[in-house]
Amino acid sequence: MDIITFTDKKHSLLLLFLLLSTIVFGLPSNDPIIIDQPRVDEDTTYKHETIIITAEQFTVSSHLKFESCDVTVESSLLISEDGAHLEFNGGALQANNSIWQLDGHVDFDQHGQDKLYVTFNSVSIFEYSNQIHYKGPNKVVWDVTGESCISSASDAVLAKGGNDHRPEDVPECDESPNPPNGDTIFYTGEEARISSDTKHKDKVVIISANNFYVDGKFELEDCETIITSMYLTSNKHLKFKGGSLEITSSDWTVNEHTDFESDKKDDPMQVVADNWALRINTDKMHFKEDVNWVYNQENSCMDGVERIEDKYHEHMPIDITQIKDCDNWDLPVELIYFEAEAYKDGASLFWATASEINSDYFDVQFSKDGRNWESLEKVPAAGNSNVQIEYQYDDYTVRTGVGYYRLHQVDFDGQSEIFGPVVVEFSTSNIELEGEIYPVPQSAGSTVHLSVNNNLPYDIQIFNHLGQLVFYSEDNVNSIHLETPWGRGIFIVHIVQGADKEIVKFQLN
C-alpha cells in the first residue's frame, strides 16, 4: 500500500474536503473515461465519472457538462468557442501547464451541495466573453499555483450580478494570444476519430492527424477543407458538399458511403488532389455533377473503381480508363514522428523518417492561426534512404501563446507532401526560470542540492565536460538532492520546465 503524507496544511484540507465530498455525494466510476478526441460538437453530460482529457488541443463547440466528476485536463490548449457552454459543477478539476481560451458560456460552480475543488498549476486563462462565471468560495475552492494567470480580452468582463469571484491573488497574464477562431477546426495529433455524427458548415476544417478515422457520419458543407493526413479510413458516411477540398499526400481507405457533390450550379465545389491514393471498398462511391476537379494523374491512384456505378463515371476526376491502380503507389517519405518542444528562447522541432525516395528538402513552416504559413528554413533531406534518419530544426524566434509548425517535404521532381501541423504552447509569462546548485565547489562523490524559483515540475539533464549525459531525472519539484559519483570536473545542468530552459554549471574537485 502506498502511504501519502501532506505537510502542506492547504493540501491536507483540500484532500479532506475531497474525501468528505466523495463519501457524501458518491464515488466516481472506477474506470476512467478517456477523452482523446480534439472536439466536442454534440451536447454531452457526464455524472459522477472520472474523466481524463488527453487531446493535445481540446475544443468545445456545444454544451459540455460535468456534474460531480473528477476531471483531469492534460491538454496544452483548451478552447470553448463562441456559442458553447462548458460547465464544471461540483467534484474536482485539475490541470497543469496549459492555456485556456474561454469564449461562450463557462461555469465553475457547485452541484447541489457538492462543492467544486479546482487545482490549477501554471494554467493561463484568457477570457473572451462576459459569461465566464467563477462562483464564490462557499461554492468553489481554488488551489492555484505556479505561473497561473487570468486575463480579460478586449471588452470581456465578468458577468454582473455580484456572485462571480475570480480566484484570489492570481495575476493578469502578460500577453493575450489570438482569440479562439470558431471558424477554424483542427483535427491533429497521431490519431483523430469522428466517433459520432458530426457536421460542419461554413468552416475551415484542417485534418492533419497522422491517422484519421470516420466512425460516425461526417458531413462538410460549404467548408474550406484541407486534408494532409497520411491515412484516412472511413467506416461511415463521408460527405463533402460544396465549398473546397484540398487533398495532399494522403492514403484513403473508403469502406462506406462517400459523396463529392455541390448543390450550387453557379458555384461548383472545387477539389484539388495531389499524391492521393483512393482505395474503394463500397458500392456507394458517388462522384456527382458540379464538382471541378484538379487531379494529379501522375502521382495519384484508385483501387476498386469497378464498384462505382456507371452514372457517376462522367463526373470522376479523370476518365475511368486512365486511372492508375495503387499496386505501386507509396508516399515518397514515410514519417515516423514529428514533434515540437517550446523553450523561452524559441522552439525545437524533431522528426524522423523510415524511408525516403528522391527527397530534396523539408521546408519548415510556422503559423499563428494554422492557415497562413511562413517559411522558416529549408532543411536538406536524405534523397534516397531505407533506414531511419532523424532531423532537428531550432527556431530561435521568441514567441508567446499558441503556434503551429508543419513540414512541407519537396522531392527533386517538385512533387511534395505536408506533415503536421503540430501545436506548440509557448510561455505566457515573463518570469524567468532560475536554478541554483549548492554548495559548490564540492568534492566528487558528495551530495549537492538543486533548487528552482517556483513550484512547477521540471526535468534535469547533467552532462560532463565531454558532453556525455551522466544523469537524467523527470518531474522533479522544488529542491532535490543529487549524489555525484561522476568524478572530478565541470558539469553542465540543463533544467527544462515546459517552454523554459535554464543552464547551470558546477564543479566537483
Image (cartoon, helix red, strand yellow):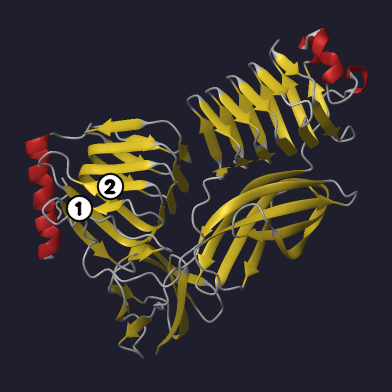
User: In this orientation, which residue lies closer to the viewer: 198 or 479?
Assistant: 198
Question: What percent of the width, then of the height, locates residue 476?
Answer: 33, 65
Disc 2 crowd rating (10 Å Cα; few below 14, some 14-19, many 20+) is: some
- Residue located beneath label 2 in the image: 107
Specify the quadrant of the image occupied by residue 97: bottom left
> Cα distance, mark 2 to mark 1?
8 Å
Question: What percent of the width, then of the height, locates residue 200?
Answer: 56, 33
- In the rendered structure, the answer to whether residue 461 lies left or right of residue 407 reads left
Specify the quadrant of the image occupied by residue 201: top right
Quadrant of the image containing the C terminus: bottom left
Quadrant of the image containing the N terminus: top left
Q: Earlier in the sequence, mark 2 or mark 1?
A: 2
Give the answer, above or below, for where 78 lies relative to 48.
below
Give the answer, above or below, for where 449 lies relative to 359.
below
User: In this orientation, which residue lies closer to the viewer: 196 or 458?
Assistant: 196
- Residue located beneath label 1 in the image: 135
- In the rendered structure, the answer to whether residue 30 lies left or right of residue 151 reads left
Cβ atoms under marks 2 and 1 closer than 8 Å: yes
User: In this orientation, which residue lies closer to the viewer: 507 or 212?
Assistant: 212
Q: What residue is rendered at 44% in x and 49% in y?
A: 79
Q: Amino acid at mark 2?
A: Asp
Q: Amino acid at mark 1?
A: Lys
User: In this orientation, which residue lies closer to the viewer: 76 or 287?
Assistant: 287
